[in-house]
Image: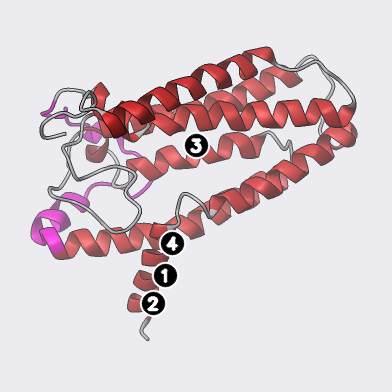
Amino acid sequence: MALLEEFEQQGTWLFKYRSYVPIVALVVGYLLYLRTELYPETFILEETPYEIYYEMGALLVCLLGLVIRVYTVGYTPANTSGRNHSEQLADSLNTTGSYSMVRHPLYVGNFFMWVGPALLTGNIWFVVSFVLFFWLFYERIMFTEEQFLRRKFGDAYIKWSENIPAFIPRFKNFKKPPLSFSWKKVLKKEKNGLFAAFLIFSFFDVSGELVEGNREFNYFLIGATVLTGLAYVVLKILKKSTNVLNEAGR
């Protein structure tokens, strides 16, 4: 099998499981985080007044990724950007908004959402390893998506992609989206992102405190986890049982 077909085959498989494979890295990161809590000398900011600021900074990095996803999804038409898992999907070619600056804005968002928890470990080598893992993992997926779009949209895709970077945005290329922002689509497609972010950070925090034998939990994270969890359940019910979140063309 030629490398072209091999890369595409690998990318197709990884595309289906792209939301789950990074969880392996998250588990490794969690174990390293517990190690840092047990051996605070391994991280220069551990047990210092600056530790909380570092952790909140990591949370902000994670939330930045969610903001990128929200902005991207909110301006796209139906059957283009989203969390579809089974197959590639694109009824039209997105070329404005986030897509006028970078070819894969959703994966840029995913990168920040995953690297935020990785930063919690306080282990620079793990963070570097995670970044390399992320690139190798998503490189195949991006390759497969681009092959799909090239076949479907032909010269239109090639012309658009010539001046649009794959992963590092070129902000000067920005073009305003023709569609208005759709909160309904965002709430329907991205409802789990905010809850997942606070759940992960809260779980790390509580686990770390328990391992140290402390009870000084970050109640902001716990409260945010409860609130976003309730919101997730409500939105899940609304999506499944009503048409409240449906919007024509979105």
Q: How crowded is mark 3: few (under 14 residues within 10 Å), some or many (20 or more)?
A: many
Q: Which mark is residue 36?
A: none
Range of magenta residues: 152-179
Mark 1 is on which residue type? Answer: Gln
What residue did someone put label 1 on?
10
User: Looking at the image, which is closer to me, 180 or 176?
Assistant: 180
What residue did someone put label 4 on?
14
Kind of element beneath mark 2: helix
Q: Residues within 10 Å of mark 4 (few under 14, many from 20)?
A: some
Mark 4 is on which residue type? Answer: Leu
Question: Earlier along the polypeptide chain: callout 1 or callout 3?
Answer: 1
Kind of element beneath mark 1: helix
Mark 2 is on which residue type? Answer: Glu
Kind of element beneath mark 4: helix
Using the image, determine if residue 67 lies above or below residue 137: above
Q: Give the tally of numbered discs.
A: 4
Instruction: State the residue lying farthest toward the bottom.
Output: 1
